[in-house]
Image (cartoon, rainbow, N blue to C red):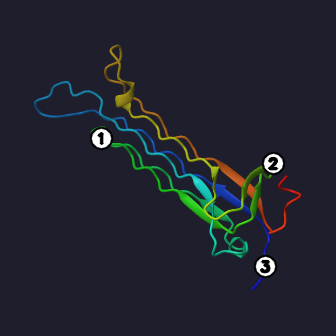
């Protein structure tokens, strides 16, 4: 078995779902009004320490991790589904740095330590959220926000004491 202690990974959080522009239409309700729901939140990308891993060998060939997108809003004020978190298991002693600045983003030492490395996008608002006394029937809705994209050099070692200070 090879011991890989340095690698570079690319992570992309999920995009937020789009809001819906819809109107309530029923037989005996002449002025139904707006009924568009909000979009769901995109998935965050989380690094989590797993005690069963002891090398970064898994990241040698699988370097890109993408979170799922949030669900779109729907009619009848239905919210879109929030995406499940994208959890990446790493060994204890993993050091994550920002590729551009070299700043240490996470130092994952103990089992169960977690670090959110990419935030998911916020879901867009549906047209029901924009209804006011002045504008009772808005015809627009917001789009979901995009998730963050980052590339990180990760490093794993049991003796990084001079870098962790």
Q: CA distance from mark 2 to mark 1?
A: 45 Å
Tag 2 residue: 103
The picture places residue 91, in percent across and down from the top left corner, at 69, 69
Please name the residue shown 46% across and 49% down the image. 70
- Crowd around label 2: few <14 · some 14–19 · many ≥20 (10 Å): few
Q: Dividing the picture into quarters, in which one does residue 139 lie?
A: top left
Q: Earlier in the sequence, mark 3 or mark 2?
A: 3
Instruction: Indicate which label's residue lies in the foreground, 3 or 1.
Output: 3
Q: Dividing the picture into quarters, in which one does residue 47 lie?
A: bottom right
- Confirm or deny contact between disc 2 and disc 1 (CB under 8 A): no
Please name the residue shown 47% across and 41% down the image. 123
The picture places residue 140, in percent across and down from the top left corner, at 41, 30
Q: Secondary structure at mark 1?
A: loop
The picture places residue 63, in percent across and down from the top left corner, at 69, 66
Q: Secondary structure at mark 3?
A: loop
Q: Earlier in the sequence, mark 2 or mark 1?
A: 1
Tag 3 residue: 3
- Confirm or deny contact between disc 3 and disc 2 (CB under 8 A): no
Q: Is residue 114 left or right of residue 19?
A: right
- Crowd around label 3: few <14 · some 14–19 · many ≥20 (10 Å): few
Indicate the quadrant containing the N terminus: top left, top right, bottom left or bottom right: bottom right
Q: CA distance from mark 3 to mark 1?
A: 53 Å
Q: CA distance from mark 3 to mark 2?
A: 25 Å
Q: Depth check: 83 or 5 in front? A: 5
Tag 1 residue: 75
Q: Earlier in the sequence, mark 3 or mark 1?
A: 3
Label of residue 160 in the image: none
């Amino acid at each position: 078995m090879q011991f890989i202690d340095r690698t570079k990974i690319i992570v992309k959080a999920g995009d937020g779902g789009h809001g819906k522009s819809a109107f309530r239409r029923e037989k005996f309700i002449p002025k139904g009004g707006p009924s568009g729901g909000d979009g769901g939140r995109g998935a965050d990308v989380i690094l989590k320490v797993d005690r069963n891993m002891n090398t970064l060998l898994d990241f040698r060939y699988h370097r890109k991790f993408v979170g799922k997108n949030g669900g779109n809003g729907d009619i009848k004020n239905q919210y879109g589904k929030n995406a499940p978190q994208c959890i990446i298991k790493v060994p204890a002693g993993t050091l994550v740095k920002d590729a551009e600045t070299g700043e240490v983003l996470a130092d994952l030492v103990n089992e169960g330590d977690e670090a959110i490395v990419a935030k998911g996008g916020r879901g867009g608002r549906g047209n029901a959220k924009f209804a006011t006394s002045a504008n009772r029937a808005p015809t627009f809705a917001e789009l979901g926000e995009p998730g963050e994209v980052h590339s990180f050099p990760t490093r794993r070692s049991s003796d990084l004491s001079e870098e962790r200070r």
